[in-house]
Image: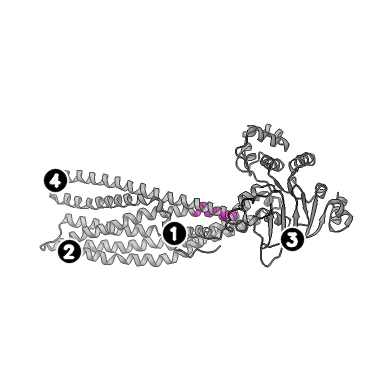
Amino acid sequence: MKKSKKPVFSRILRYTKPCAALLAPAVISAVISVVLSLYTPILVGNGIDYIIGKNNVDFQGVKRYVVMILITVVLSALFNWVMSYCTYKITYRAVSDMRKELYAKLNRLPLGYIDSTAHGDIISRMSVDIEQVSDGMLQSFSQFLTGIVTIFGTIVFMLRINVKIALVVIFITPLSLFVAAAITKLCHDKFREQSAIRGELGGCIEELVGGQKVVKAFAYEDRAQARFEEINGRLLKCGIMAQFYSALTNPCTRFVNNIVYTAAGVFGAISVISGAPGAMSVGQIATFLSYANQYTKPFNEITGVITELQAALASAARVFAVLDEAEEIPEKQPPAEAYPDGTVEIENVSFSYKPEQKLLENVNLSVKPGQRIAIVGPTGCGKTTLINLLMRFYDVKSGVIRAGGNDIRDMRRSELRRMYGMVLQDTWIFTGTIRENIAYGRPDATDEEIIEAAKMCHCHSFIKRMPQGYDTVVSEEGGRLSQGQKQLLCIARVMLTNPPMLILDEATSSIDTRTELKIQSAFARLMKGKTSFIIAHRLSTIRDADVILVMKDGNIIEQGNHRALLEKGGFYANLYNSQFEQA
C-alpha cells in the first residue's frame, strides 16, 4: 500500500467545495454568535456597576441589563445553531462524497489489488476510517471557526478596556500553542500506527468470522483467540500511548491559560485599588476577567480537538492510499465489430501473478464458434488463471487473446464480460429476494422468464417450498439455503442471461449426483451453439467435449478429444484411468 505524497489536510478540504456556498453563512453566523457572546460580559459589567453598595442598588438599571443579556444570549445561541447546521452539512456531504469516490475507485482497481489485500482492511477503510474523518472534521470546523473569531474579538474588547493588561494576556497565551505543537508531534505517529493496526484487526475478524466453520472443524479456537488477542493487545498499547500523548495537551494548555487568568486578575485588582485616573471599575475588571477566560477558552478547545484531528488525518491518509492506487489499464474505444462471435484465439500468452513465479508460458489455442473446450490438469497448473485472462480479470503480460478477431484489450471490459456466462465453484448470493438473485444479470426479466430459468436448473421446486417463494429474502451468510441450492441459483442466473459464451468452473461440485445429471442435460441445451469453456476435476463429465486441453505447470501439454487422448496413452489417459480405478 503506497502512501500519498499530497498533503492530507488540503485533500480533505477539496471535498468541501460542493458545499462552499454554505461556508459564508457559517462564517457570518459564527461571527455574529461570538460577537453577541462577547458583548454579554460588557452588559454584565455595566449591570454590576449599578449595584453601588448596600441599600444602594439601581434596580431599574439592573433590570434593563438583565433583559438585554437574555436577548443577547438567545440570539447568540440561534446563530450558533445556524453555524452548526452549515458546518454539519458541509462535513457530511464531504464524507459522503469521499465514501462514494472510494467505492467507485474499488470498482476500477484491478482484481490483483483486491486479491492481495485483506477484505476486512478494505471494509475498515470504507467504514471506520471515513467515520473517523467525519468526527475530526465536525469538531475541527466548528471549533476552529468559533475559536478564531473569539480570539480576535476578545483581543479587541480587552484592548478597549485596558491596553496594558490586554498586552500581558496576549503575550503569555502563545506559550500554550508551543506546548500543543510539541505534543502534537508525539501523538501524530501513534494515531497513524493505531489506524493501521485497526485495519489489521478488521481483516483478522473478517477472516475468522467468515471461516468460523473451518476454525471449529480444526479445533483452531484457542489459536484464533491468541491471534486476535495479539493484534488487539498491540492496538490497546498503541491506543493508550496515543491517548496519553493527546491527553497531555489539554492540561498543559489549561495550566498556561490559568496563569493568564491569574495575571489578568492580579493586574486588574492593582488597577482598581490604585484609584489612579483611568483605573478600572469593579464592573470593568469583572468584564475583563470574563474576556480573559473567553480568550483562553478557544486555545483549550482547539488543542482539545487535536486528538480527533490527528486520528482523522491518519485515517484519511489510509483512505487516500487506496485512492492513489494504480487503476486498471484504461479502456479503449471498441472497434465497430469488437463483439465476440464465439471465436477465441490465444497466441503466445504468458502470465504470472508475481514476476519471480512463472505460471503460464507461451500458451496457444484456437477455438471455433460453438466448440466445447474442457480444461483439465492438476491443482495449480493454471486452469483458473486462463479463465481469468479470458474474462480480463487480469491482463496478459505478453501475447494476445482475441475474441471475434479483436484483441480483448481493445474492448470494453463490461461488453466483453457480458458475452460470457460464468458459473464458479464458489457461489455468491447477495442479500435480497430469490427473484432478485436470479435476475442479477437481467433486472428487466419477466417473472415467467425467471421461473423458466429456475425450472431448467431444477430449483423451482425448493423455491416454492420457501416461506415467501421467489420473494423469500436470502443471503450468502444466511442459513436458508444449502450450498447446493446456492449453486443451483447461480446456474439459474446464467441460464436467464443466455450469453453467447459460457465458462463453467466446477459448476456442479456442490450438487448431488442425481441432480447433477439433470443439470448436465440443462447445460447441454444451454451450450448448444455456444462456445463453452469447462473446468472439471471429474473427467467423466467432460467426455463429450470437442477439445480437451490438458495443462501442467502452466503449459498445454496435450490437446484433443476424449477418445484420441485415451488412445495416445499420455498424461490425460493416466489421469482418467486413475480416477476410474479410484471409483
The reply to whether the C-beta atoms of the residues labelled 4 and 1 are less than 8 Å apart is no
Q: CA distance from mark 3 to mark 2?
A: 94 Å
- Pointer 4 or 2: first along the chain: 4
Residue type, label 4:
Gly
Query: Which amino acid does the dot numbered 3 rest on?
Result: Val
Highlighted magenta segment, given as a residue range? 108-129
Q: Are marks 2 and 1 in contact (CB under 8 Å)?
A: no
Q: Is residue 375 left or right of residue 248?
A: right
**Element carrying mark 3:** strand
- What secondary structure is the stretch in magenta mostly built from? helix
Tell me if residue 15 is in the magenta stretch: no
Q: Amino acid at mark 1?
A: Arg
Residue holding disc 2: 270
Which disc is residue 11 wearing? 1
Q: Which mark is residue 363?
A: 3
Kindly report the distance in space between the C-alpha atoms of the residues bearing marks 2 and 1: 51 Å
Residue 230 picture location, percent across and down:
59, 60
Picture disc at residue 461: none
Q: Earlier in the sequence, mark 4 or mark 3?
A: 4
Q: Report helix, strand or loop for mark 4.
A: helix
